């Protein structure tokens, strides 16, 4: 059999399924290469996190709303939404809680799902949010000591101890 | 751990054994974990990083799995030694290039590595030669559970394991299978194959992960999503596609052998010839030619070379390995000369004139 596009022998026999209809192609090596590399020229790059995020925020938000959102910060680690948007990395586990409504559409965009179906940890299977609050409490205690506000510091110390001494619930 | 002891071996990922090892180089699984009581790395202070390292290091060294784990303080390593661990696939490029307290625990077989203070506080990795996802998962699951009994990982009842980047949230699992696909590259079908993989949300990466070039026709196929499916489902998704890719590659090889045997034999022989005679050669060209030779050996076109020898050359001719084997630091030009010398010496073993030199 000869190549459909020249006189050489066809060595590639391609069956292309487009819209359910099989289409037979008989091509020589050179034309087969051309055919295979020509089709579907669009770049094969997976969407980046920053790209997805930028797109998502551009939809249905005014510049004013966006500026306001950018200034919001996490009470535990202090990261602003703007910083997260820029670096694509979150600041602490609590960000998933305090930026929940912003992150949810992003997570759906990336994973198509919002619920973990896999392994649970040996400790803290019901969530480890209170352990993460230790980040804030320890910082506040340091600040209180710095300000010589010992009453507040000792209150914070008790709170910290209470969390540290209650082991995370096991699975 | 004495890195110099590792230099002369080729590590797990290029051992060249295991199922389908003519095409599947390695099966790798990693889990991303963070301690609940510390900020993620981007907001961690120097003292946070130091504490995270101390806590994890202490706990990890208490668990003894798959032989003794040895700890390497990456922050104190020289640049060349960090690069060496990257070439070895024991740490990531990001881990090598970042700053501050960080380290890695490695087992003697180089199957297990636990990176501390990478993008997440802890990245556990298990790598096996060939196509071996099931036992790699069993091993990493065990290690993760053992570490998880010692510390509290950041976990959300609905979202699962919490990670610094939302692309890893949930299972924190990335499963990657590294494939050698030279015939799909030669027949120019590779882009088409990859486009179809992306449609089923699998990612394709080069040899050293994200953003790296597909050097030497090595490609890593991995899962894109980490949430909403169990670990076994995610592993199965990648595991199911690998036999299809192996089949494509074998068919492309058969086709080349059948339809353009002379061209193929010529390409493979020329590659072998250059590697045996070149006087100066870059890392990229070496990878490219070794790839052709590797396929030639697998197809029986070259008979005086064994796959393990070849695999060793892939790793030993990389910049940091080459310099550590030579025992001195070399600039690019001198590395290219040394690389050519190394290749000549190892590929002309039977030739009395060349053996034993240098």
Image (cartoon, coloured by chain):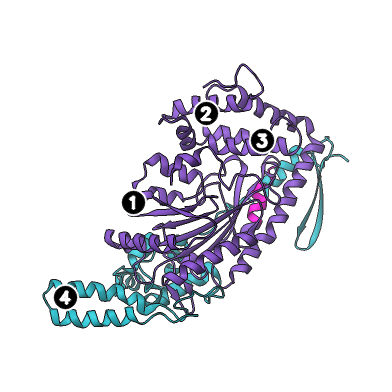
Question: Label 1: few (<14), some or many (≥20) within 10 Å?
Answer: few
Relative to residue A137, is residue A24 depicted above or below? Answer: above
Which residue is nearer to you in this view: A14 or B304? Answer: B304
Residue at image mark 4: A144
Kindly identify which chain the residue marked by label 3 belongs to: B
Q: Which residue is mark 1?
A: B99
**Which quadrant would residue B258 be assigned to in this image?**
top right
Give the mark, 1 or 2, whose residue is nearer the N terminus: 1
Of residues B193 and A41, the one nearer the viewer is: B193
Residue B302 at what x, y percent from top left? 73, 31
Q: Main secondary structure of the magenta part?
A: helix
Which tag, 3 or 1, sits closer to the chain's start? 1
Q: Which residue is mark 2?
A: B339
Q: Quadrant of residue A60?
A: bottom left
Q: Which chain is depicted purple? A: B
Q: Are marks 3 and 1 in contact (CB under 8 Å)?
A: no
Q: Chain of mark 1?
A: B
Q: Secondary structure at mark 4?
A: helix
Looking at the picture, how far across and down is residue A131, in whole percent?
A: 36, 76
Checking the image for residue B292, the label placed there is 3
């Amino acid at each position: 059999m000869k190549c459909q596009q020249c006189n050489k022998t066809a060595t590639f026999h391609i069956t292309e399924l487009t819209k359910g209809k099989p289409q037979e192609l008989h091509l020589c090596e050179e034309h087969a290469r051309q055919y295979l590399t020509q089709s579907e020229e669009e770049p094969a790059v997976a969407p980046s996190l920053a790209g997805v995020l930028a797109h998502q925020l551009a939809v249905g938000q005014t510049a004013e709303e966006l500026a306001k959102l950018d200034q919001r910060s996490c009470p535990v680690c202090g990261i602003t939404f703007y910083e997260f948007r820029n670096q694509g990395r979150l600041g602490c586990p609590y960000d998933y809680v305090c930026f929940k409504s912003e992150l949810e559409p992003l997570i759906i965009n990336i994973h198509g799902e919002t619920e973990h179906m896999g392994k649970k940890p040996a400790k803290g299977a019901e969530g480890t949010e209170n352990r993460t609050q230790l980040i804030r409490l320890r910082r506040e205690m340091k600040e209180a000591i710095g300000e010589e506000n010992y009453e507040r510091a000792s209150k914070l110390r008790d709170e910290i101890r209470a969390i540290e001494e209650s082991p995370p619930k096991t699975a | 751990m004495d890195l110099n002891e590792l230099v002369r071996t080729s590590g797990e990922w290029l051992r060249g054994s295991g199922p389908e090892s003519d095409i599947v180089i390695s099966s790798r699984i990693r889990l991303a974990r963070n301690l609940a009581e510390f900020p993620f790395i981007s907001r961690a202070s120097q003292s946070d990083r130091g504490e995270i390292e101390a806590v994890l290091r202490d706990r990890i060294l208490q668990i003894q799995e798959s032989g003794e784990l040895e700890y390497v303080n990456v922050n104190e390593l020289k640049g060349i030694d960090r690069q060496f661990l990257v070439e070895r696939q024991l740490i990531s490029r990001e881990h090598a290039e970042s700053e501050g307290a960080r380290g890695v625990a490695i087992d003697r077989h180089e199957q297990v590595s636990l990176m501390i203070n990478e993008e997440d506080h802890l990245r556990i990795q298990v790598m096996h030669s060939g196509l071996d996802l099931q036992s790699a998962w069993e091993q990493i699951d065990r290690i993760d559970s053992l570490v998880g009994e010692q510390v509290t990982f950041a976990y959300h009842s609905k979202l699962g394991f919490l990670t610094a980047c939302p692309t890893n949230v949930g299972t924190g699992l990335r499963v990657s299978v590294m494939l050698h696909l030279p015939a799909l590259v030669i027949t120019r079908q590779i882009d088409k194959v990859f486009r179809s993989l992306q449609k089923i949300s699998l990612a394709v990466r080069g040899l050293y992960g994200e953003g790296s070039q597909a050097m030497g026709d090595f490609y890593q196929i991995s899962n894109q999503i980490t949430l909403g499916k169990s670990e076994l489902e995610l592993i199965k998704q990648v595991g199911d596609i690998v036999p299809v890719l192996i089949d494509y590659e074998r068919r492309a090889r058969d086709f080349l052998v059948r339809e353009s045997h002379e061209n193929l034999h010529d390409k493979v022989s020329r590659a072998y010839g250059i590697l045996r005679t070149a006087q100066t050669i870059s890392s990229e060209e070496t990878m490219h030619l070794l790839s052709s030779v590797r396929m030639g050996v697998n197809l029986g076109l070259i008979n005086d070379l064994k796959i393990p020898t070849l695999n060793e050359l892939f790793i030993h001719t990389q910049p940091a390995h080459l310099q550590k084997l030579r025992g001195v630091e070399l600039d690019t030009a001198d590395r290219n000369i040394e690389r050519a010398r190394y290749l000549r010496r190892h590929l002309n073993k039977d030739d009395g004139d060349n053996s034993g030199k240098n």
